[in-house]
Image: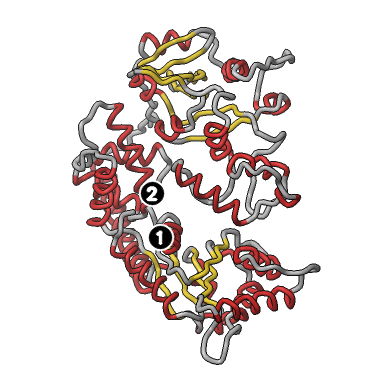
C-alpha cells in the first residue's frame, strides 16, 4: 500500500470513529481511489476487543440486511424471520458483548446502493444502547453518490448522527509520481522508467485515481517495450490511453464545488464566443481576397507495420474464428459433430464457455491458459490464432501446426482482444455471487475448505465463503469483490485442479 496523505487521513478517521464508538462513520470516494483497500487496512488494525461484521452486498431489504449482520457476528435467530426477532437477537448479543468489554462494528461497502427504507432501519439500530453507551458502531463506505443520498431531507436524522466523515480524493501530481515510483520500487524496477512529461500526462488523464494510474502505466510499459524504448514518454502514454479506452478523468458533480463549476462554464462560454468571432472575422477576410475553392477531404487510413514473414505465414493458414475455436476444442478432447462453423453457442452445447476480454498482455498471460488472439494483419484483415505458449522472445501458436512468431511482431498487431475457452466446474454456471444458493457453491467449498462432511447449507454462498474468495482474489491480483466470475473460476481451477486443464507452455 502507498500511504498518501489522503489515505492516512481516511484511515485515521475510521479508527477515530471506532474509538469514539456509537453513531455512524462515512467514508466516500471516487471509484478506484482505494476505499476497499482502506477497509482491509482497518480490519488488520482492529483492536482485539472489537468485533466486525462486513457487509459486501448492500442490495438487500431490511430483514435480509439484519440477517446478514447476525450471520457475520455468529448470532443465532429463529424462523420465520421478522424484524422483531432479528433485532431482539442482535440486541441480546450486543449486551453480552458490552458486558465482556467488547465493541461491535458493522461496515457496509458500496453503501450508495442502500435503499431509504434500509438506511432508516440501520439508523434505528443505533438506538440499541445502555444508559451510558451506544452498543453498535456503523461504517458506511461508498461512492460520492452516498453523500447526495445522505443529504436528503428524509435521512437528516441519520446524517446528524455521523460522528466522522471523510471524502477520499485522487492523488495530486506529486503523489502520482511518488505512487508510480513506489510501485516500481516494490518490484525492484527502475524508478526512472517514466519521464516527467509522461507522469504529468498520466496525472491529467487519470485524475490521480490509483486504479486508472495502474491501468495506464501497465499499458504504457507494454507500448514502450513494443517500441524498444528505454523510457516511457508522454506520446506513449497518450497512445496507451486510447488503447484502453481511457478518456480524461472527470470529477463527479458531488465532489466539484458549485462555484468552480459555474466559473468553468462561464470561462468556456467566453472562450467559445471569442473563438466564434475570430472564425467569422477570418472568413470575411478570406472571402474578400480569394475565390471559393472546393477541397476534397480524404479521411486518414489507419496503417500497420508490414507483417513479419512468420506472421504472414500464420495468416496463410486457417485463421478464422471457427478454425481457432476448433483448435481450442481439441484441448478438451472434444470434437465438433456439426458441419456448421463453430461459435460460442456451439461451444456451450459441448459444455464449454467463452470468455471474451480486452486487457494487457501481462494480465492475459496471468490466466495461464491457451487463448485465441485477434491480430490485425492489415486494416482490412484480422486473423484468429490459438496461443499455447511463450518461448523466450517468441510466441507459440497452434494453428494446423506449431508456428513461432516474434513477441514484438505480435504486440505490434495485437489489438488487446482475446477469447479463452474454459470448462465451468458445474454445467451452465458462469458466475456466482454472495448470498446465492447454487450447486456450484458446493464446488467452491470443496476447493477452498476441503471439508469431509459438508452440511446441507453448503450450497449457500455465505459471508465467510465470500471473504475466502476475496482473499483468493487478492492473492492473484484480481478485483477483490467476492464475485466468482470466469477469471476467478479459471484461477481456482489452475490452483486446485492442476493437471486437468492445458496451461501455457513457457520456456526460455
Residue 379 vertical position relative to residue 69 in the rendered view, above or below: above
Q: In front: 239, or 79?
A: 79
Q: In front: 274, or 467?
A: 467
Q: Residue at x 20, y 31 (%)?
A: 230
Task: Classify 10 Å Cα crowding around label 2: few (below 14), some (14-19), many (20 and above).
Answer: many
Q: Which residue is mark 2?
A: 212
Q: Are marks 2 and 1 in contact (CB under 8 Å)?
A: no
The quadrant holding residue 396 is top left
Q: Which residue is mark 1?
A: 41
Task: Of the two numbered discs 2 and 1 on the same chain, state the one appearing first in sequence.
Answer: 1
Task: Classify 10 Å Cα crowding around label 1: few (below 14), some (14-19), many (20 and above).
Answer: few
Relative horizontal placement of residue 131, taking residue 71 as reference (left or right): left
Q: In front: 257, or 333?
A: 333
- For the rendered model, the colour scheme is secondary structure
Q: Is residue 111 visible?
A: no
Q: Residue at x 24, y 37 (%)?
A: 232
Q: Residue at x 51, y 26 (%)?
A: 369
Q: Is residue 217 visible?
A: yes
Q: Where does residue 365 sit, x and y in percent of width and height?
A: 44, 29
Quadrant of the drawing holding the C terminus? top left
Q: In front: 96, or 247?
A: 96
Q: Secondary structure at mark 2?
A: helix
Residue farthest to the bottom, as pictured: 131
Q: How many marks?
A: 2
Amino acid at each position: 500500500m502507498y500511504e498518501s496523505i489522503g489515505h492516512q487521513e481516511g484511515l485515521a478517521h475510521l479508527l477515530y470513529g471506532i474509538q469514539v464508538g456509537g453513531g455512524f462513520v462515512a467514508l466516500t470516494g471516487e471509484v478506484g481511489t482505494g476505499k476497499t483497500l482502506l477497509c482491509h487496512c482497518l480490519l488488520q488494525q482492529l483492536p482485539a476487543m472489537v468485533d466486525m461484521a462486513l457487509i459486501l452486498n448492500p442490495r438487500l431489504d431490511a430483514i435480509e440486511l439484519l440477517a446478514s449482520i447476525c450471520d457475520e457476528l455468529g448470532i443465532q435467530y429463529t424462523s420465520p424471520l421478522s424484524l422483531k426477532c432479528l433485532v431482539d437477537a442482535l440486541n441480546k448479543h450486543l449486551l453480552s458483548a458490552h458486558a465482556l468489554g467488547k465493541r461491535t462494528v458493522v461496515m457496509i461497502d458500496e453503501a450508495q446502493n442502500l435503499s431509504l427504507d434500509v438506511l432508516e432501519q440501520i439508523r434505528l439500530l443505533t438506538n440499541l444502547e445502555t444508559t451510558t453507551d451506544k452498543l453498535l458502531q456503523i461504517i458506511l463506505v461508498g461512492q460520492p453518490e452516498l453523500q447526495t443520498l445522505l443529504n436528503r431531507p428524509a435521512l437528516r436524522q441519520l446524517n446528524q448522527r455521523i460522528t466522522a466523515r471523510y471524502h477520499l480524493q485522487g492523488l495530486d501530481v506529486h503523489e502520482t509520481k511518488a505512487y508510480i515510483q513506489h510501485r516500481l520500487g516494490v518490484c525492484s524496477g527502475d524508478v526512472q522508467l517514466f519521464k516527467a512529461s509522461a507522469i504529468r500526462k498520466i496525472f491529467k488523464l487519470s485524475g490521480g485515481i490509483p486504479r486508472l494510474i495502474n491501468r495506464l502505466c501497465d499499458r504504457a510499459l507494454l507500448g514502450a517495450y513494443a517500441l524498444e524504448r528505454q523510457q516511457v514518454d508522454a506520446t506513449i502514454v497518450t497512445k496507451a490511453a486510447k488503447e484502453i479506452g481511457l478518456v480524461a478523468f472527470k470529477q463527479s458533480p458531488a465532489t466539484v464545488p458549485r462555484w468552480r463549476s459555474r466559473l468553468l462554464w462561464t470561462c468556456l462560454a467566453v472562450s467559445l464566443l471569442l473563438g466564434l468571432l475570430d472564425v467569422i472575422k477570418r472568413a470575411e477576410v478570406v472571402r474578400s481576397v480569394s475565390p471559393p475553392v472546393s477541397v476534397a477531404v480524404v479521411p486518414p487510413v489507419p496503417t500497420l507495420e508490414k507483417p513479419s514473414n512468420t506472421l504472414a505465414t500464420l495468416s496463410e493458414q486457417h485463421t478464422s474464428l471457427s478454425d481457432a475455436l476448433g483448435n481450442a476444442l481439441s484441448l478438451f478432447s472434444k470434437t465438433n459433430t456439426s458441419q456448421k462453423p463453430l461459435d460460442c453457442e456451439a461451444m456451450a452445447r459441448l459444455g464449454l464457455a467463452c470468455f471474451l476480454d480486452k486487457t494487457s498482455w501481462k494480465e492475459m498471460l496471468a490466466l495461464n491458459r491457451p487463448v485465441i488472439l485477434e491480430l490485425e494483419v492489415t486494416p482490412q484483415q484480422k486473423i484468429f490464432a490459438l496461443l499455447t505458449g511463450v518461448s523466450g522472445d517468441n510466441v507459440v501458436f497452434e494453428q494446423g501446426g506449431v508456428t513461432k512468431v516474434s513477441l514484438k511482431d505480435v504486440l505490434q498487431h495485437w489489438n488487446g482482444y482475446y477469447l479463452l475457452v474454459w470448462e465451468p466446474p458445474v454445467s451452465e454456471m458462469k458466475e456466482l455471487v454472495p448470498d446465492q444458493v447454487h450447486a456450484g457453491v458446493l464446488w467452491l467449498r470443496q476447493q477452498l475448505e476441503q471439508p469431509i462432511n459438508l452440511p446441507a447449507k453448503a450450497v449457500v454462498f455465505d459471508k465467510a465463503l465470500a471473504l475466502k474468495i476475496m482473499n483468493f482474489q487478492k492473492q492473484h491480483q484480481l478485483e477483490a469483490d467476492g464475485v466468482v466470475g470466469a477469471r476467478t473460476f479459471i484461477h481456482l481451477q489452475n490452483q486446485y485442479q492442476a493437471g486437468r486443464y492445458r496451461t501455457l507452455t513457457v520456456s526460455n
